Amino acid sequence: MSTWSKRLRHLFAAVLFASMPFIAPLPVAAQGRVGTLPDFTELYERQGPAVVSIDVTQKAKRQRFPDISEDDPFYEFFRRFGQIPRNGPGGGNGQQREFETQSTGSGFIISPDGYIVTNAHVVDDANEVTVRLSDKREFVAKVIGSDARTDVSLLKVDANDLPRVAIGDPDKLKVGEWVVAIGKPFGLENTMTAGIVSAKGRDLPQENLVPFIQTDVAINPGNSGGPLFNMKGEVVGINSLIYSRTGGYMGLAFAVPIDIAMNAVTQLRDKGRVTRGRIGVQIQEMTKETADAFGLKNANGALVNNVEKDGPAAKAGVQSGDIILKVEGRDVHASTELPRIITQIRPGTKVSLTVWRKGTTKEIPVVIAEMKEDVTAAASPRKGGKEQPKEKPKPNKMGLVLNDLSDEQRKALDLASGGVVVDDVVGVVRGNVQPGDVILAIIQHGAPVEVKSAAQVNDYLAKLDNSAPVTFQMRRGDQTFYATLKSGTG
């Protein structure tokens, strides 16, 4: 080969190499997994027999004939065609007829002697519950008890030596980890579907006691009550909810963590009902601005905005403005975690709360009381009207039109002194404030300073930089809370 040919070949090779895309080497930890997917066959063979199908029969009565008066123009029409008994509406002869409805769900065996866990909504108002095992055996199950707040129900069948699931630890689950479900979607028994953990600790509307596990496992009607397994074959959750606009799977499924469920199961088995703890505080979420106002480095904990009079927290010395950082040494990372921790503690137990107050931490012992399930939190109507001033004051630097409270207003709000009312909000103010709110205190250097007049607040705001936030303790109706406000023009 001539020297010219060699040079041409080397030049061609260099151009070809330069035109190829650069592919970075895979990390060492990932190289062994290239082109492989998890194998679920062994998990299904081991755990499938402990998953059951649940058929529920519900009986309901409904009126057999139209309830219309003899004076109605259509009365004779319905009577002639047999829709109304001859002795008229309400005259017996089968006025009401009993109908049966059926639904299906899933469950799993937790003990060889026949205890089974499912969702409470699967067996609601059931007249008969039939459990079907993977080996085709069928049993009529007794509902030991249900807990609507966690959507957990405990069943019992008369059998022994049954296969059972292994219980795992949902706290060890990681986002991105593979998980699988086995259940009865659309009546198809022992169906397995797989996916990953999409998120943990999800808060769903109207439910703050369950930190749901979110997955993209295919969950459909009939999967409710079935187990969610990790790759070790341990149950880490109960498939309970889906988000869907069609009624079917859309990639968003939610499971009750198994530790929350088993706490309810243990109480249902021991005493037939679930009791929960409470300490009698109203709390709100911490923000970075609120943390700065109270002198905290991180926006962790639950900010106490109101303490129930004569409740456990009040008796222990907890105050409005305290930030609860820990319960018995367990960190409270967000306000939503506090009720979940407290409700899991047996009433009558003494626990230590670590709170942040005026720049320092304090340990406060509190005796947990029992939560009454029929008590619901509701916003109270605003007490007292606002007096119209003779001359409307001008908005302050932040755009708040403030007025001093009258003696009548303070009496209606049960305030001994101080407080100013927000008459109007002018311009753009970022934060939770609206006309009718009452400002009780300004948080300065981590401690509340009582507000005694509108002039005091206006003077304080006038000295702040345009972009500086301010945190107020406020009153709205019967609810006390903390709000960090910013001017929209800053």
Image: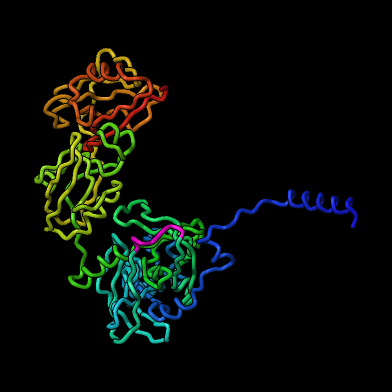
Q: Quadrant of residue 243?
A: bottom left
- Above or below residue 3? Residue 101 is below
Q: Quadrant of residue 211?
A: bottom left
User: Residue sitting at 25 percent across and 33 percent down?
Assistant: 295
Of residue 411 and residue 166, the one placed in the foreground of this image is 166
Q: Quadrant of residue 453?
A: top left
Provide residue 380's location: percent of width, then percent of height.
23, 40
Q: Is residue 61 visible?
A: no
Provide residue 2's location: percent of width, then percent of height.
90, 54
- In this figure, what is the number of numbered marks? 0
Of residue 217 and residue 404, the one placed in the foreground of this image is 217
Provide residue 6's location: percent of width, then percent of height.
85, 53
Q: Is residue 276 magenta?
A: no
- Read off the magenta span: 170-176
- In the rendered view, how is the structure colored? rainbow
Of residue 287 and residue 388, the one placed in the foreground of this image is 287
Of residue 100 and residue 242, the one placed in the foreground of this image is 242
User: Residue sitting at 16 percent across and 30 percent down?
Assistant: 412
